[in-house]
Amino acid sequence: MWRGRDVISARDFSRKELEELFEVAKYMEKYAKSRVNFLKGKILATAFFEPSTRTRISFEVAMKKLGGDVVGFWGPEGTSVEKGETLADAVRMLDAYSDIIVVRHKYEGAAKLAAEVAESPVINGGDGGFNHPTQAMLDVYTIWREFGTVDGLRVGLVGDLRHARTINSLLEIFTNFNVEISLVSPDFLRPRTETIDYIHSRGVKYSFHTSLEEVIHTLDVLYVVRIQKERFIDPLEYERVKGSYRVTQETLKNAKKNLILMHPLPRVDEIDYRVDYTPHARYFKQAALGVPLRMALIYLIIS
Ligand code: NCD
């Protein structure tokens, strides 16, 4: 099901495939603290044209834990991209040197373009404001590990639902499960119409809200995203919404006891630091689960 595949959009994966991925990720958790030889001799290349901390490092760590090697670059500095080399040419070179390529880019469609020119499988490590499929996989994996299931849960998504690619991919992945989604944002930061149309067509139950207080007591999972400053076309619009939807201990006072609070990170100020010490906080564990999940992904694709 997975061998040789590109991972470009979360829409491309079925429930069955995701469940297989989660089972393998759980198996990989055993090895996430050591090193195995499953992919000895294989090379993963990272082509990161946009900043990243967790995605790049967790892919690199995952490959190293599997016994493989890693090459690549982040930022155009020090590479021929600075001399004007195109994305397609840079990817062609990495393709010649490696077995699997992870691409991150500020433009939507960059990963698809890379997959078209590369023979090796290409994984989208986030391109533009629309797709970040492996983040969504690890997000749903975190929920699956926490609750033992994804079905029947009520999930709240809060913040910049329009520009956050993690939100779009997460909504797409959720269509494989029986979840009920509360979308909490200012009206103009609701998810894109095409995403809403997609989840609607797949029968997901969802509702729109502007106030988190209104829904907090109903939720099992609260997923927070930062306002994506760099993706706003109009800086005045950013000024209008920055600082809204800040989650504090006060916000959580009516939450269910076992509500888990997630965030793809980096956070700016949308979660108060004191919340880190409450039993709800799961964002650091979520980031840590990126390693076994990405081990499973790489393993399933190139072993
Ligand atoms: C996200 C991203 O880059 O889209 N970070 C991540 O990959 N964990 C989230 C963000 O930048 O807000």
Image (cartoon, grey):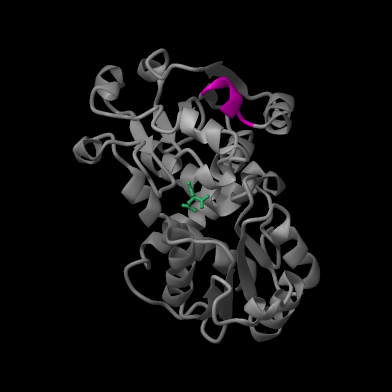
In the image shown, does 205 or 210 lie closer to the viewer? 210
Relative image position of residue 36 (x, y in whole percent): 42, 77
Vertical arrangement, residue 114 with respect to residue 276, above or below = below
**Residue extending farthest right:** 116
Vertical arrangement, residue 167 with respect to residue 116, above or below = above
- Look at the image and tell me whether residue 99 can be seen: no
Quadrant position of residue 92: bottom right
* Residue at 29 percent of width and 39 percent of height: 281
Relative image position of residue 255 (x, y in whole percent): 31, 21
**Residue extending farthest top:** 214
* Residue at 73 percent of width and 55 percent of height: 109
Query: Where the N terminus falls, by quadrant?
Result: bottom right
Quadrant position of residue 32: bottom left
Q: Disc count in the image?
A: 0
Relative image position of residue 97 (x, y in whole percent): 65, 85
Q: Is residue 32 left or right of residue 132?
A: left
Look at the image and say whether residue 190 sits in the magenta stretch.
Answer: yes
Vertical arrangement, residue 64 with respect to residue 104, above or below = below
Please report the bounds of the magenta region as a residue range.
186-191
In the image shown, does 272 or 81 lie closer to the viewer? 81
In the image shown, does 72 or 37 lie closer to the viewer? 72
Look at the image and say whether residue 55 sits in the magenta stretch.
Answer: no
In the image shown, does 148 or 58 lie closer to the viewer? 58
Query: Where the C terminus falls, by quadrant?
Result: bottom right
* Residue at 71 percent of width and 76 percent of height: 84
Relative image position of residue 63 (x, y in whole percent): 49, 73
- Look at the image and tell me whether residue 68 can be seen: yes
